[in-house]
């Protein structure tokens, strides 16, 4: 799928959320050398923007009307690391994590991003998922 124009995203989710999306993408790009791909969002979302390397997904952003979602999937070992560091996470992120559904292949942690305050929590979660390869 081709790149999605910023203006199209702004119409879909709003200027503020698009700015937050690009801020977070810039932070992730500073830390990780990964493929970044736009996809269709499936039946529940309009678009997906995924970070992956060698077929393994680090995280993905999801877009639909007025909503910017972020997903990271934690396997069993990663879940125990998140739980060990739970006191370092904000209440809203921890609550979303605790309410996320666990499947046979991991805990699918999805939450809506509403402001930039989430960036530091996202970095902590990404470090648990995979050590940065650009530090």
Image: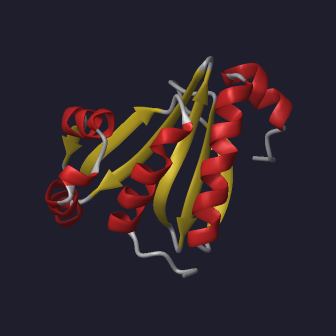
**In the image, residue 132 lies at what x, y percent?**
48, 75
Total numbered badges shown on the rendered structure: 0
Residue at point 63%, 28% (across, down): 46
Which is more toward the observer, 17 or 9?
Answer: 17
Is residue 105 visible in this depiction of the protein? no
* Up-down relation of residue 120 to residue 90 (above or below): below
Location of residue 66 by image quarter:
top right
Residue at point 52%, 28% (across, down): 114
Which is more toward the observer, 108 or 84?
Answer: 84
Residue at point 64%, 42% (across, down): 21
* Up-down relation of residue 69 to residue 73 (above or below): above
**In the image, residue 105 lies at what x, y percent?**
25, 54
Which is more toward the observer, 67 or 119?
Answer: 119
* Up-down relation of residue 111 to residue 35 (above or below): above
Which is more toward the observer, 118 or 67?
Answer: 118
**In the image, residue 24 lies at what x, y percent?**
60, 50
Residue at point 54%, 82% (across, down): 135
């Amino acid at each position: 799928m081709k790149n999605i124009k910023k203006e199209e995203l702004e119409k879909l989710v709003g200027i503020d959320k698009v700015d937050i999306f690009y801020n977070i993408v810039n932070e992730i790009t500073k830390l990780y050398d990964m493929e970044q791909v736009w996809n269709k969002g499936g039946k529940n979302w309009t678009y997906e923007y995924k970070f992956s390397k060698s077929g393994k997904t680090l995280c993905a952003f999801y877009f639909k009307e007025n909503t910017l979602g972020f997903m990271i999937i934690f396997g069993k070992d990663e879940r125990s690391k998140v739980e060990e560091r739970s006191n370092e996470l904000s209440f809203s992120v921890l609550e979303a994590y605790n309410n996320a559904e666990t499947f046979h292949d991991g805990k699918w942690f999805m939450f809506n991003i509403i402001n930039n305050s989430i960036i530091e929590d996202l970095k902590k979660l990404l470090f648990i998922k995979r050590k940065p390869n650009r530090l």
